[in-house]
Image (tube, grey):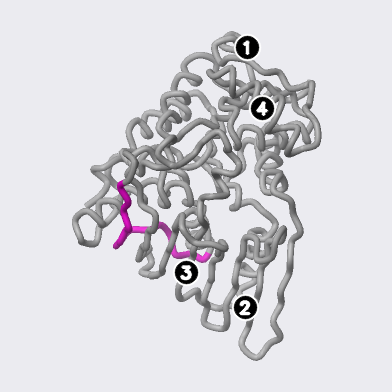
Amino acid sequence: MKTKVKIIGAGSIGNHLAYGCRQQDWEVVLCDIDPAALERTRTEIYPNRYGRWDETIRLAHPEAMSEENFDVVIIGTPPDTHIKIALDILKQRPPKLLLIEKPLCPPSLADCEQLRSRAESLGVQVLVGYNHTLTPNTRLTEQWLQAGSLGKILTIHAQIREHWQGIFKAHPWISGPEETYLGYTERGGGALGEHSHGLAIWQHFAHLSGHGRIVEVSAMLDMVEERGACYDRLAQLNLRTESGLTGLLVQDVITEPADKQLRLQGENGYIDWFINLKPGMDAVKLQLQGKPEQLQYFEKTRPDDFQPEIAHVGDLLTNPGQISPISLQQGMETMLVIAAALRSHATGRVVKIDYGRPYGPDSLQ
């Protein structure tokens, strides 16, 4: 039987993931509480992006699907709705796998621990949609890093700096950040939440290089209050891991053209990881001391960014015992650092993360 998928939220990400699932020949139901959003998907977003509307996709109000079972449920709604929707799904008809779009939740961290415990008790795998952790440029970076030629990794520097005009072009029915969660850091928006791919990939390579989790955060944010919105347009974080490795992270929603990259600096050279180094091309560069530069490009389209994520979902359905780099645990750790950054900015001091305490604000020292 075909894999059955329910996607909640017919915005930009819902359409991307619906298309990705259809490339796997999965059965897709795309749900939204707004009939206008479903109509916009059918007549505008999907056909404009992918050439034509896919008549096999069912469009429905979420309540109309409440009595139907699905292998996969994907939540593509605003971050401040994620946890409630996820808990409701687990209470009603738990799927085999639940994929939640990033960021996992608002920085209040409310009810995340409840989600984790309930999912574990039901045997449901939960993922958080940091799709760039699975793309080909990341896979090659992992191979080069694990080859060991860099020696010890001395520092990591990542930046996801991109004006959010691209987001509004993908959502032309939204005129500005104040009309959506994007304009409210406390709802999971702003640079910290919307561009948290930077933090997630920093954490990913810190883990892979043996440096563990982030335990200290010092942050400076550029906060904006306008037209009722309140968000960080620039976030600069100094980070320290369990091993003592220190590094930098910058995320913003103002840089144009975009600059999305990470550097792994080792004893014997470095690896640079890029998103869209050239239009339509991700890349990875390896530079070892005394050796010629190795630079590899990965040609892609925007829909290609989500294909490895959907393929990973398929792999986990077949082999559920695998450890996922986009697990709920990883997504919760990313949110802890975001919460720590906000507290650091508010207090003007370094904030420590104690992973031995119950997950939530009490983990921050």
Which residue, given by chain and number where applicable, does mark 2 sit on?
149
Considering only order in the chain, which callout, 4 or 3, is on the residue closer to the N terminus?
4
Q: Kindly report which numbered mark, 1 or 2, lies closer to the viewer in this rendering.
A: 1
Q: Residue furthest bottom?
A: 290
Could you tell me how far apart the alpha carbons at marks 2 and 4 are, in whole angstroms?
A: 48 Å
Q: Are there few (<14), some (14-19), or many (20+) residues within 10 Å of tag 2? A: some
Q: Nearer the viewer, residue 300 or 204?
A: 300
Range covered by the magenta-colored residues:
209-225
Tell me which amino acid carries mark 3.
Answer: His
Q: Are there few (<14), some (14-19), or many (20+) residues within 10 Å of tag 1? A: few
Could you tell me how far apart the alpha carbons at marks 2 and 3 are, in whole angstroms?
A: 19 Å
Q: Secondary structure at mark 2?
A: loop
Label disc, if present, on residue 41 of the rendered structure = 4
Considering only order in the chain, which callout, 4 or 2, is on the residue closer to the N terminus?
4
* 2 left or right, relative to 340: right
Which residue, given by chain and number where applicable, does mark 1 sit on?
68
Residue 237 location, quadrant: bottom left
Q: Position of residue 184 (x, y in %)?
A: 36, 41
Which residue, given by chain and number where applicable, does mark 3 sit on?
157
